Image (spheres, coloured by chain):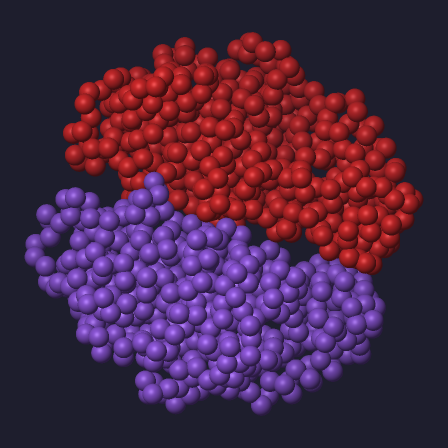
Chain colours: A purple, B red
Amino acid sequence: MRPIDESTVPEWDADAEVVIAGYGVAGAAAAVAAAQQGAEVLVLERAGGWGGAAALSGGFIYLGGGTALQRACGYDDTPANMAAFLTAALGPGGDPHKIRLYSEGSPEHYDWLTGTCGVAFRPAFFGEPAWEAYGDEGLMYSGGENAHPFTAIADPAPRGHLPCAGPLTGAPNGEQGRGRLLMEPLVRTASRLGVTARYDTRVDGLVVAADGRVCGVRARSFGRTLHVRARRGVILTTGSFTYDEAMVGAHTPRLSGRPGAAVEEHDGISIRLGQALGAQVSHLDACEVAVGVDPQHLIRGIVVNAHGQRFINEDTYAGRIGQASLLHQGNGCWLVLDETGFEEADAATRAAEQLRTSPTVVAETPTELASAMGLPEGALESTLDLYNRHAEQGRDPVHHKAAAWLRPLKGPLGAVDLSPRTAGFALGGLTTDTEGRVLHVDGSPLPGLYAAGRATTGIATGGYASGASLGDGTFFGRRAGHEAARR
Amino acid sequence: MRPIDESTVPEWDADAEVVIAGYGVAGAAAAVAAAQQGAEVLVLERAGGWGGAAALSGGFIYLGGGTALQRACGYDDTPANMAAFLTAALGPGGDPHKIRLYSEGSPEHYDWLTGTCGVAFRPAFFGEPAWEAYGDEGLMYSGGENAHPFTAIADPAPRGHLPCAGPLTGAPNGEQGRGRLLMEPLVRTASRLGVTARYDTRVDGLVVAADGRVCGVRARSFGRTLHVRARRGVILTTGSFTYDEAMVGAHTPRLSGRPGAAVEEHDGISIRLGQALGAQVSHLDACEVAVGVDPQHLIRGIVVNAHGQRFINEDTYAGRIGQASLLHQGNGCWLVLDETGFEEADAATRAAEQLRTSPTVVAETPTELASAMGLPEGALESTLDLYNRHAEQGRDPVHHKAAAWLRPLKGPLGAVDLSPRTAGFALGGLTTDTEGRVLHVDGSPLPGLYAAGRATTGIATGGYASGASLGDGTFFGRRAGHEAARR
């Protein structure tokens, strides 16, 4: 892991202008952009094929500020509006330069994805509360933009862009995670531009020239050690540290044992390789946390903590509920619904084959339910009483769930234990500038070293929105590729 | 900030076996221990005199496991009992090796402080709810050991050890923070053992020999640059990064603009110097958060968040209330008390000249009070109703405040806005082993480099107890001094 002095490298086993570690979404975007600059690009991927966490994901790309897809679906958005949302919802601690650039560059980035890379999006808006669209609709809310408190901070605009099957994707839509519908065109585009890839090749060291510049990598491939020279730059894109128990324990211990939406390759090696050169890191405590319950159910019920208290509006982004539950409420949370609520939600999700959400415990009365849930005496009753009293008036002055979803919870009740259903991935990593250059703790760039994706701190430093990682991974990965090739 | 190659050092301006950066409590303990090993020790301190944050602090040292002071006050404690508390209350994410060693070594460390260093403690227990003892009592609860949920996890034992004026302290007791009564004997002991110090000397670089060993420091002193050779080792003890806005923004943004119990010298330079050599860091998000309200008031009232809900037992360590408020409840919290409560608490604190705690708003009824506080309609009323109903029965099944402090809140009410009263310091820093060696991200020690105090991650990685910083700063500072000198 310690930097390798170039003078100790026996010989270069391979050579390229730009060497990229990791062939997930950030690596693919970087590869395309570097190749567009005319650079010779070699991607080293630890797994047996390209894809990374992105290929298995839902495929959301968080874009806005007035993309062609937003306009085609009839939604207005501006970069300033988008930046206001990101600053409020994905912080605290966001980098204002990254947020501004990302918001302003979003429409063009969408055009690059569709035009240059051939990613397809169907111009249809999906409006149900859901983790993902049921069909191949291309646009949906994915971060709570249309819920309290963000409706008062920025004009609501959906920014979750979801790819569909297009001319460059082999898989028929729906057979696999839609992330593949993003990854496949990116990789095909990279190949078309001459990018080459080596698989089963795990980067585990950075080679540094006498002048301090990163000039290559060391890797293990099919049992032997390789040294690969990078004549212009090295780009680290091997993902988060979610699967490294030691790093999780040191930085975000509440996530320990709960990896989600990550892949086993997410061992934080890029972050540690950067740190070994004195790189700055940031927001290593931050994580995305999903809760494995369908939003159709969440939105119709109340979510309570181990004290029987509500703590959030249930119509917000479900990942926000997950983060609040795991990071701020001690993870002992429950969803409480009445029979009508379960029936309505089941009906809404059945056709779509979404997440099955069955009650962990059921009871005839709030007191019996609270007892079965192990909640303190009187607390759930008090919460339900206040909620129901307000819901009868179509109001939720305490947590501001929208009136459309308010209905007193009556009759037999069921509760879903959310504790075993929270899982997520780490958001923090190497501190990079807007061009993807890895920064030293003294604030200056480390020559020859670039990074992108979840190995870096991106636009989400506290909160999250679905699509932020594929979004900033492609956006800043592309900039890193461009910058590295330009040298 | 980048490592300085020894070959580029023009000449050594000074020389010692062990060079310590920072003359706060960790530096002083390291200096004494290194000198006890016979090493020639030079301490470089940025300020005009020794003391650091420790000298201005309340002087708590968190010790237990059966110290002589605990026994003299009639309290039983064991290392296992102490470790169980620390693991539960100061985590998540604590280093089990550090916690075990600290708990087991605590009684001997107390003897070292009193015997070798001449720190005095009066064997008297102070039992009032308070941030600090009113007189010169030597022992009190300082971490919520005697409150829910910790009473069920470990046998309650007070571990806040408070020094009093003794033969080695010039200041009469009570005139200054009791931290001085710890610092002064430590520094006198160091001086007696031959330790020398240079003031106005700010370390800003580490000098590294050809073999990779840290062999000195660069510093600025009275306007000029010095290079100081360290023949055995360098110990970094310049405190936390609480006053470095960039680091706070990158690691623990909720603390931004709220430094407390820290000094301006806490600029994180030790952490950044270590990082520039590839050092691992951990728990940089963690912080101690005090709330500037007297516990006599807190314990008699209810603390509610911006939703009008209670979230913690008000008889726990007040710093725990501060942490929960700022880090998990969005900092919009209030203390609500009735007239009787204010009168009782005022009476209890008046004689002691403790913190003045006056209501921000007052009202005749809960509804009027909630409105003046800007709370959502009905929420505070619901909370008070449930609390009072249970309090009448002498119970608090929701948050488990002890029966002795339960009384229905009735009649005119007052609320204290806690938002402007939260402040604290960062707990995370360089990752060290139990001997104070700074660890590289690959897990191996960085040769010649040691660290202690709040420049490092100590026993508090999430929660906090008063005395944890002076405690682990002296305990692991001492071990670092011993180890560096031993080489």
On screen, residue A364 versus residue B233, left or right, reads right
Figure check: A8 above or below A50: above
Residue at horizontal 25 percent and vertical 30 percent from the top:
B207
**Count of numbered badges drawn on the protein:** 0
Residue at screen point 15% across, 48% down: A209
Q: Nearer the viewer, residue A257 or B227?
A: B227
Q: Residue at x 77, y 27 (%)?
A: B349
- Residue at position x 77%, y 36% in the image: B297
Horizontal and vertical percent position of residue B22: 41, 25
Q: Where residue A240 sits: x, y (%)?
A: 38, 61
The outermost residue toward the left is A11
Residue in front for this viewpoint, B326 or A60: A60
Residue B94 in picture, x, y percent from top left: 48, 46
Task: Return the x and y of residue A302 as percentages of the image width and height.
Answer: 70, 69
Answer yes or no: is residue B179 visible: yes
Which quadrant does the C terminus of chain A fall into? Answer: bottom left
- Say left or right for A274 vs B352: left
Instruction: State which quadrant residue B446 falls in.
Output: top left
